[in-house]
Image: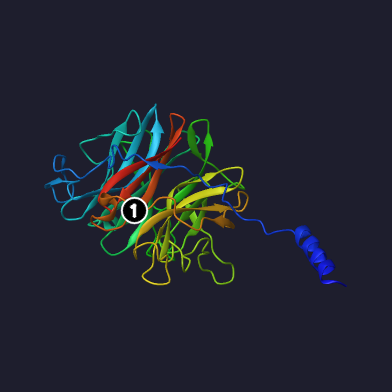
Amino acid sequence: MSVKTLLIIICIASCNTKRPTILVNNWAMQGFKKVDSINPILTPSSVEKFTCPITHQSVFWSEKNVLNPAAVVMDGKVYLLYRSQDSAMTSRIGLAVSDDGLHFTKLPDPVLFPAEDSMKKYEWNGGVEDPRVVESDKGLYILSYTAYDGEMARLCIATSTDLQHWTKQGLVFTSEKYKNGWSKSGAIVVEKRDNKLIATKINGKYWMYFGDTDLFIATSDDLLHWAVAENEESKKMISVLHPRMGYFDSRLVEPGPFALLQKEGILLIYNGSNAANFNDSSLPKFTYSAGQALFDKNNPYKLLERTDSSFIKPDKKYEKEGEVNQVCFVEGMVYFNSKWFLYYGTADSKIAVAVKE
């Protein structure tokens, strides 16, 4: 066989060989643009005063930091629930309202806060943190939040019909095994129905991703009472998403807003932190930025794909410098006026917005 003939055979074989598919993450939400002309949209304030029901003292309840925004649309307006901190670093949940999703007016008092109630032992004196909000198909608003007593974080649920008056429903995990263990950051699976984002069942259950190291998963019949998904043999929580060496999420992963059920699967926007080593060398160590993951729509615990890089990261001064440097922490999203609005905390100090047409 001549060399020329051999080269022709090799060429034909090469051309007929199926090339590996290159994943382009066409399921991910792309095209968010920071609204630099108005960001940050919420900042700390020494104007709003509030009488703490525990100390009976008047405090400037949002003078230190505002962060961790959750968002929902009600009656044609965007409502932003956000974590605020006073000078003692006690956290409370405030509420701000907008006609356009960009310019917000704060209510003068917090809407969720530590008080002389059954949750005081879990909430005082660290406060209430990290809100994420969804709507049920009956019009009830479900708020997952973190109670922090200064040592232990515990995931909790509160409910409301008007977003201003909240009923604390207690700890998400009430079993002796989990109620005194660290838990936070609950993102419930929703689906888009017209312009609303409604908590939805899969295989007869509601599902929630949670955690701030690895991500875990829990199920519920009623959005109030939840059971942790465990490995049948080890009886330990099942990790469904974990940090990756060499990537933006090499240190930890934590849920963003709700998880969105789509035809391709369940889309979860999540926050990742860059480790001190074995990390993404293009980012400073400990940088918080956001990526996206896709889970099976029939098996919410089954990871299908995840993005290799973050789609939003600190590149503005107010995102790089603050209470915690180098932070873009996504926690709120709404579909409003035919656009997606993404709300995120910056350097654990202020709140900003990005929009996708």
Q: Nearer the viewer, residue 164 or 212?
A: 212
Which quadrant of the figure has residue 325? bottom left
Name the residue located 49 percent from the left edge and 31 percent from the top edge.
195
**Residue at label 1?**
314
Which quadrant of the figure has residue 126? bottom left
Q: Nearer the viewer, residue 42 or 229?
A: 42
Name the residue located 14 percent from the left edge and 51 percent from the top edge.
55
Residue 74 at x, y percent in the picture = 39, 31
* Relative vertical location of residue 9 with respect to residue 220 in this rendering, above or below: below
Assign the N terminus to one quadrant of the image: bottom right
Q: Is residue 146 left or right of residue 231?
A: left
Q: Is residue 127 left or right of residue 198?
A: left
Q: Nearer the viewer, residue 330 or 213?
A: 330
Q: Is residue 25 left or right of residue 347?
A: right
Residue 284 at x, y percent in the picture = 34, 63
The amino acid at mark 1 is Pro
* Extreme residue toward the left, this view: 57
- Colour pattern: rainbow
Residue 29 at x, y percent in the picture = 50, 44
Whether residue 313 is visible: yes
Whether residue 145 is visible: no
Name the residue located 59 percent from the left edge and 67 percent from the top edge.
232
